[in-house]
Amino acid sequence: MSHFFNSLGSFWFPLCPSNLLEKNTVLSFKILGRSLVVWANANGMIGALDDRCSHRSAALSKGRVHIDGLLSCPYHGWRFDPRGECLVRPQLTDQSTSNVCKVPSYETTVHYGYVWLKLVRKSNAYIPNFPESADPKIRQIQGFHEVWNCSAYRLIENGLDNYHHHFVHSDLLETLSPIPSPVQGGIEESEDGFCFSSILKLRKNKNLSNALGHDDTIYTVKRTVRWLAPFGISLELDWSNGLWQRIVQYAIP
Ligand code: FES
């Protein structure tokens, strides 16, 4: 394994909304250059393996979930469990050597309505804590899940960029604040990476009134940006009318 894979693969990545992985669904993903198959069986158990059968290298993502909950290879029907163990080879009567046919497997878990995956098992990485997820007064909305043709670091850098709103989002946000200085309010190191805050004053417009459900002349919003190393961003928005939002974005290279 390369150093690149070992270091970045130690983190948890939100792979997809968990409702995409309904029972008996098989999906393929590419993450850090590795092709994976991820499946859920009828009991909701999720498995993630290299997308390459240990027999003749067929793509396991072209297979299906067998009635016994194992992932069945599309070529000769070998069946794998979530640890990558090949438990059934239909052509053989003796299954006792199936442990030599193992496929590399990966840890998965479900948090915040997403399937998370970690490529390197021996790591202490954790999934960021968003305490409001347990608050029944807070509504969670799933955002978009799509391919961006750019470097993952470029996407994260955009989330940390405090200067572009005045230009890129000027139709939505007519900013009355000056462009913030680089360290407005200071940058604090956190256990995930770092965070900083800034306050924007915005002039009322139709988009804002619709989005916030209020009709104030001037809106003030405190933005707190948190870098969730290596490829996550959390943006908290504290609006002067009492509304609060957190927007979380992840890149999966
Ligand atoms: Fe998978 Fe033969 S290639 S069972």
Image: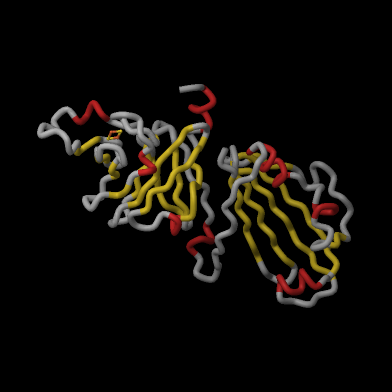
> Is 163 placed left or right of 72 in the picture?
right
Give the quadrant of the C terminus: top right
Residue at image position (39%, 42%) is 61
Vertical position of residue 77 compared to residue 243: above or below = above
- Taking depth in this image into account, of 95 and 117 the one nearest to the observer is 95
Vertical position of residue 171 compared to residue 150: above or below = below
> Is 102 placed left or right of 231 in the picture?
left
Give the quadrant of the N terminus: top left
- Image quarter for ligand 1 equals top left
Residue 64: give x, y in percent of width and height: 32, 48
Vertical position of residue 245 compared to residue 83: above or below = below
Residue 136: give x, y in percent of width and height: 50, 69
> Is 188 placed left or right of 39 in the picture?
right
Residue at image position (44%, 43%) is 28
For this orientation, the residue located farthest to the front is: 75
Residue at image position (52%, 22%) is 3
Residue 237: give x, y in percent of width and height: 69, 60
- Taking depth in this image into account, of 7 and 148 the one nearest to the observer is 148
- Taking depth in this image into account, of 188 and 19 the one nearest to the observer is 19
